Image: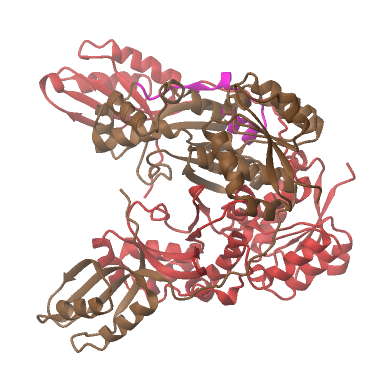
Chain colours: A brown, B red
Amino acid sequence: MSGSLKIGLLGRGTVGGAFAELVEQRAATIETAIGREAEISGVLTTGQGDFEQILAGADVMVELMGGTDPARQYVLASLEAGVPVVTANKQLLAKHGGELFAAAEKAGVQLRFEAAVAAVVPVIRVVQESFGAVEFSKVFGIVNGTTNFILSEMAATGASYAETLKRAQDLGYAEADPTEDVNGADAAAKMAILARLAFHTPVTLDMVDFEGIESVQPDDLAYAKELGLSLKLLGVAERLPDGITVRVFPCFLYPGHPLSPIEGPFNAVMVEAPEITEVTMSGPGAGGQQTAAAVLGDLVSVVTGDAPTHHAPEELEVLSDVASSFYIHLEVADEPGVLAEVAKMLADHEISVKSVVQRGIGSDARLVMVIHQCLESRFKQAIGEIGRLGSLRSPPRYIRVIEEEFV
Amino acid sequence: MSGSLKIGLLGRGTVGGAFAELVEQRAATIETAIGREAEISGVLTTGQGDFEQILAGADVMVELMGGTDPARQYVLASLEAGVPVVTANKQLLAKHGGELFAAAEKAGVQLRFEAAVAAVVPVIRVVQESFGAVEFSKVFGIVNGTTNFILSEMAATGASYAETLKRAQDLGYAEADPTEDVNGADAAAKMAILARLAFHTPVTLDMVDFEGIESVQPDDLAYAKELGLSLKLLGVAERLPDGITVRVFPCFLYPGHPLSPIEGPFNAVMVEAPEITEVTMSGPGAGGQQTAAAVLGDLVSVVTGDAPTHHAPEELEVLSDVASSFYIHLEVADEPGVLAEVAKMLADHEISVKSVVQRGIGSDARLVMVIHQCLESRFKQAIGEIGRLGSLRSPPRYIRVIEEEFV
């Protein structure tokens, strides 16, 4: 291979810094993926670096400075010089997407921007590549984590919008100036990008109507709960008989809607088309490291080109004895001491019990428990011994449990 | 462009037939996506067609015949002849993935297989391409729709496994011979493929331990409900300190787990890594048309190569007046006739009410309602008139609602 891959990095704030760190941490994986080493050959920050010089030494440019000016000039100059660009800049794409895509096409180089919408949730790639020949009817979802956190908290605590915003700021889920997040403008930029890709039509930010969550009252959430509704700030891009609509607004969802369980700072996007029914993607919609991971994914794609590699350079051992948590169902004799007997056998194997339900009388008595994680071999020994107890009316039944509990 | 794209099609069962239909239906979109027309130039079925002849005339081969023999020979022969292949054949990849990937790499042509795992849920592409340089810690999920339907139904109805399987067969969610689905073997093949891609290690089907759902008792589901648990057949591929584990087993989940709301024939896969936290993808995991849509997405990628196109050939009108459903919150005077007044004003604008909550007394009286979908311009007129009512103590508040209700 022709030496290392030289990455020009524009901006070294939260995401830029996380990206530089990730390139270092994942050096071995990146080398395996792209077939050569990668290094950051130049960094431009407000006080440091010269763009022309960075461009001259770069194989690929990563733009993480944000804002449209001078990001637009730098991205255009890179593409025109035949250097592919990866960016996380939603404002830039929502306002100047047409110009940038045309420049990339003219130069025959890639422009990738997964991280511009919902960070690590792979919605850009899925819309553009997985469903490259699908006629989408609708693309919609929760594309702003700050507002989703605030609405989840308001619903859970009954606190006011102002109090909850303050709490979100304290926890790092809202910026000191949260205007663009809470008024819907941030989500509108992301929806402009998604609508353009889904409907192959030149949507820009100024075409997107948006409303925010500033006027949501705790009352609304309380009454809505009685109707079974949960509130989300939704971005909706939809194909209608006469055109399309691209909007952002707070919206109630009925229970069972795939977006209603999305809580806190997570993002989720649904795509719909007759031939695919619907596909939902969710995950963290922000965060320096998560955004940087999406940028790195794009970078690898830019370099490796068309065919994903199927290399299997590792020979990892496939283990069979692992730790699991179990549900145990015992049909027991209705007599004193059975629980004590079973509990002692588990304790003898250092297996601890998480929860127990004892139910039924006479010939229907049952002992149902969930045990904490232990090595399966140890569990099998214990359950074997339990199975030989005289107080059991049938062989023990057991099913694994994933122990994580959520709020 | 150099004439039309010639597609060789191996197999014309449910998925093959749906694929052929989709290529015809979506001819215009495909032409836009790949820059030339596409046509199926040859079809091989049990009784018809000659493989060598089809191969000689094909620019790309689509293998939808299933089974490993003769699919393996045909796929290898295509790759060796320099013809890229798209397949939905999970058995083939789970058993002979290493050989096929090596053949593709040697020939320098693409082998794509999104539809082999979870149909239209884009998990293969996301694992391989979106997160090309991520070190996954875990890839797991619900990758068999038949068993998820059966478990959802058993939990909802309390019916036995045998009864529910019969019902699944009647509804087309289970095959006449459901063995491979219900015993976990189908899910095991998919997990072998995912584990290989996620961990870059040569996992094959015979390394995957699997258990099915045949011995799940309605009792287990009833008792588990008391513990707040829901049952899923999970495939789990996990990186551990000493190696990896790849297994399929029925497993209880606590409420709030991202996989617990996945009901019926849907599939869902979660990927975890420190730098991405977690990403969840869900959608229909089977179905002729849905599987065909995933195959078509792969086909477009094989043809277009590296850079996704950003063409915007359509100029769709962005509409602002669309139909929405609304929640309305009115602080009203505690006097008779207010509901009647409001209801009449809505009726005058042909707006129909879906649900009403009237609550509070005296200075806290409220009227909260959800109305069915109507044009927003019409709603704004109605709410304007309502706002002028003397019986309101403050301006009306309203928030949009997505009306779809789910089970």
Q: Does B132 sit left or right of B85 as displayed?
A: left
Magenta-drawn segment: A192-214
Task: Say which residue appears at 19% left-offset and 68% top-offset.
Answer: A357
In the rendered image, residue B51 lying in the magenta stretch gets the answer no
Which residue is at the front of the view, B263 or B373? Answer: B263
Q: Where is residue B192 in the image (x, y as percent from the top left)?
A: 58, 68
The part of the image, by quadrant, that contains residue A200 is: top right
Determine the residue positioned at 33% across, 57% down: B254
Q: Is residue A187 visible?
A: yes
Residue B47, position as x, y percentages in the image: 77, 73
Between A144 and B381, the one lying in front of the other is A144
Above or below, B253 against B306 in this view is: below
Question: Would you say residue B132 is visible in this rendering?
Answer: no
Up-down relation of residue B146 to residue A344 (above or below): above
Q: In this view, does B221 lie to the left or right of B9?
A: left
Towards the viewer: A42 or A100: A42
Q: How many marks overall?
A: 0
Q: Position of residue B171 (x, y in %)?
A: 48, 63
Q: Give the image location of residue A349, x and y in percent.
A: 28, 78
Is residue A296 rendered to the left or right of residue B167? right
- Give the vertical position of A281 relative to B16 (above or below): above
Q: Which residue lies furthest to the front in this view?
A: A48
Residue name at image x 63 percent, y 27 percent: A93
Whether A208 is among the magenta residues is yes
Quadrant of the rendered image containing residue B260: bottom left
